């Protein structure tokens, strides 16, 4: 089941996409009175999920306010996250290799510990919205297609085998990065947190829609050219490890967004590097979830 945050006219709401992918049904017309995706993530019961799943297979005239998907504006599923997004760095082995090459460092092929960092998101960028180039600050703009997941429950001291019970759903994140800023400061926070650097969407795919752990193809394209092509089964540190490790040191609140890292094929991995420029179209795609498309703007 796919849930979306969308806008019709001046009204914004949360909806479920019909099983045929043609319509959006406002969930408030089905029963649950959730005004935002975060409310739904934190409060939705299993019976409500089942109700929405059933509703998604009904005829559009069954629900007041149903709209054709092509006629609404999709927003980022969680437009304003409550906290910074937790990200995994270098979590595919092939990306670890290309990252070491870019930095002209030796790579020993070992990743004994996960690398975590935080990405500030004042407002997530929606599908079809622009990515600002920040040309006065950035000379090496890069893309990173990633699978992100959203916690539906507070998580503290969670055993790995229990993690799946805490996952509400999945979405796509493009972890846009300013490589020169990232390298200049010798840390990732600033270079990955500029305004507009968190395209997200187009929906939240509920966790029960795919097998766990998710083994999904993940790709990115720049101006139609395939750049990244991998599968989330190749994560070095999988979702079970990530949530369990973090939750043994900090409370992870419901609504927390965690992005699992990107495979090889980013701009810095080419020789010479192939960074984004104004006018470039970037598509990030994850199997079952969909794709987000964004154009770099000056």
Image (cartoon, grey):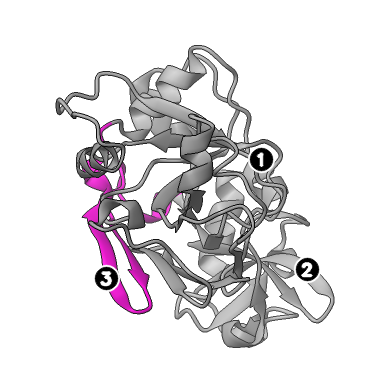
- Depth order, front residue of 199/3: 199
Q: For residue 96: magenta?
A: no
Closest to the camera, between mark 2 and mark 3, is 3
Image quadrant holding the C terminus, namely bottom right
Q: In this view, does 220 lie to the left or right of 59?
A: left
Where is residue 43 shown, x and y percent of the image? 68, 42
Residue tagged 2: 12
First in sequence: mark 2 or mark 3? 2
Q: In this view, does 94 lie to the left or right of 247?
A: left
Q: In this view, does 290 lie to the left or right of 278?
A: left
Quarter where residue 89 is shown: top left
For the residues marked 2 and 1, what is the alpha-carbon distance in whole angstroms? 19 Å
- Residue lying at the far left in this picture: please name it: 108
Residue tagged 3: 226
User: Residue at left 24%, top 44%?
Assistant: 98
First in sequence: mark 2 or mark 1? 2
Which range is magenta? 207-236
Where is residue 209 shown, x and y percent of the image? 39, 56
Q: Disc 2 vs disc 3: Cβ atoms closer than 8 Å?
A: no
Q: Disc 1 vs disc 3: Cβ atoms closer than 8 Å?
A: no
Q: For residue 220: magenta?
A: yes
Which SS class for mark 3? strand
For the residues marked 2 and 3, what is the alpha-carbon distance in whole angstroms? 34 Å
Mark 3 neighbour density, 10 Å: few (under 14) some (14–19) many (20 or more): few
Where is residue 158 shown, x and y percent of the image? 45, 18
- Depth order, front residue of 94/140: 140
Mark 1 neighbour density, 10 Å: few (under 14) some (14–19) many (20 or more): some
Q: Which mark is residue 42?
A: 1
């Amino acid at each position: 089941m796919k849930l979306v945050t969308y806008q019709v006219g001046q009204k914004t709401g949360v909806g479920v996409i019909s099983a045929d992918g043609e319509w959006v049904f406002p969930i408030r017309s089905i029963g649950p009175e959730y005004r935002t995706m975060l409310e739904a993530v934190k409060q939705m019961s299993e019976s409500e999920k089942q109700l929405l799943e059933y509703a998604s297979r009904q005829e559009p005239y069954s629900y007041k306010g149903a709209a054709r998907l092509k006629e609404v504006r999709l927003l980022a599923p969680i437009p304003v996250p409550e906290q910074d997004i937790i990200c995994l760095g270098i979590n595919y082995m092939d990306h670890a290799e290309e990252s070491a090459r870019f930095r002209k460092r030796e790579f020993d092929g070992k990743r004994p510990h996960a690398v975590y960092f935080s990405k500030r998101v004042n407002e997530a960028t929606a599908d079809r919205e622009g990515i600002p180039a920040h040309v006065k600050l950035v000379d090496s703009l890069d893309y990173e297609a990633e699978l992100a997941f959203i916690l539906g429950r507070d998580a503290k001291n969670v055993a790995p085998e229990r993690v799946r019970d805490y996952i509400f759903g999945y979405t796509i994140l493009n972890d846009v990065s300013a490589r020169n800023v990232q390298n200049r400061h010798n840390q990732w926070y600033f270079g990955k947190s500029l305004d507009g650097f968190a395209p997200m969407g187009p929906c939240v795919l509920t966790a029960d829609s795919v097998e766990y752990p998710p083994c999904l193809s993940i790709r990115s394209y720049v101006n139609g050219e395939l750049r990244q092509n991998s599968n989330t089964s190749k994560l070095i540190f999988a979702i079970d490890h990530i949530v369990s490790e973090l939750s043994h040191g900090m409370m992870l609140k419901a609504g927390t967004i965690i992005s699992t890292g990107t495979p090889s094929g980013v701009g810095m991995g080419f020789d010479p590097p192939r960074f984004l420029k104004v006018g470039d179209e970037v598509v990030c795609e994850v199997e079952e979830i969909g794709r987000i498309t964004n154009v770099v703007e000056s």
